[in-house]
Amino acid sequence: MKKGQLLGKTLDELKAVAAEVGLPTYAAKQIAEWVYGKRVRSIEEMTNLSLSGRKALAERYTIGCVPPCDMQQSNDGTAKYLFPTESGQKVECVFIPDGDRATLCVSSQAGCRMGCRFCMTGRQGFGGNLSVTDILNQIYSVPGSEQLTNIVFMGQGEPLDNLDAVLQATRLLTAPEGWAWSPKRITVSTVGMRKGVERFLKESDCHLAISLHNPFPEERLQMMPAEKAYSIRELLALLSEQDWSHQRRLSFEYIVFDGLNDSERHARELVRLLSPIECRVNLIRFHQIPDTPYRGASEEKMVWLRDYLTRHGVTTTIRASRGQDIFAACGLLHAKMKE
Ligand code: SF4
């Protein structure tokens, strides 16, 4: 019999586990403490459970942590890890240390259905949703996990296309009986699946990032086929109705491509669309991927665009480029492994 996994279970689910293996209901809280608070790696370490209780639990369950099966380390300290999933797929996450901060970019799906033309993962097609355990295992088992200060759902997959699992993972990361993180430390990114965004806004306090990349729908469609089903204009209408002045932050991700989305016309349209919304724009350098006509914009263009948007009232930063030498663009380590 395949054993179940404790990592990823809510308190209510752990109560059911406790009942199943003959432990008292209060043991669920103790198990959550061990798994999420103390981060133990084995059931034997749960010393406040009775010996027979631990034995019964271990017969049916494991913690669910699996170490990475491959990694690449960049000169700048960024490290990319490949993790096996429960269903036998492999997914990447990227550990990005930065002074006293450390961010982990996690995957939510094996492959991706969205097919963005500039993305290696998009080219690989879709291999399935990650389970809550698969998502949390990247955070739990990545070397340097204790140093993490931020988590971004910007790895492989479209997080809102696997929303149940992503919401449960973020709930466990922020619940008092889970990791008890502030939702301000977690950002979930999306191409803009409208229904998913609506639900996310209702059910989560984490930050939201929209992959914009082009303000003109017909041009965006050429880069991101998902524009057809998930219109950015409709999404912006929805987002402009929200109150963003409180805790949650809204940001727009914008990879700047040479000659594609870096003109004054694009800048003007970005200002027109985004200046009425309380948000920020992150300009991202394109990590070159094999066999693509896409090229990153020059450094001068990046700076010009940042200054133009900022001057016109849209808070804009250029995201520091990390891990260039190890292909930090999502999907590449997995693609290399396959080769
Ligand atoms: S950029 Fe993100 S949403 Fe687009 S194909 Fe790649 S993983 Fe999917």
Image: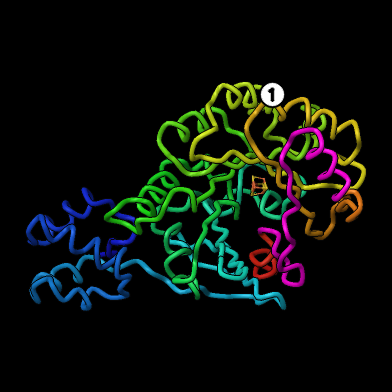
Looking at the image, which residue is at 60% across and 65% down? Answer: 94
In the rendered image, the vertical position of residue 153 relative to residue 80, given as above or below: above
Residue highlighted by disc 1: 233
Q: Is residue 55 visible?
A: no
| Residue 185 image position (x, y, % from top left) | 49, 53
| Residue 328 image position (x, y, % from top left) | 69, 64
Highlighted magenta segment, given as a residue range: 302-330
Q: Nearer the viewer, residue 4 or 250?
A: 250
Looking at the image, which residue is at 61% across and 70% down? Answer: 99
Q: Is residue 278 visible?
A: yes
Instruction: Residue type at mark 1: give it.
Output: Arg
Q: Quadrant of the N terminus?
A: bottom left
In the rendered image, the vertical position of residue 174 relative to residue 332, given as above or below: above
Are there few (<14), some (14-19), or many (20+) residues within 10 Å of tag 1? some
| Residue 212 image position (x, y, % from top left) | 71, 38
Looking at the image, which residue is at 49% across and 35% down? Answer: 246
Q: Nearer the viewer, residue 56 or 280?
A: 280
Looking at the image, which residue is at 54% across and 48% down? Answer: 187
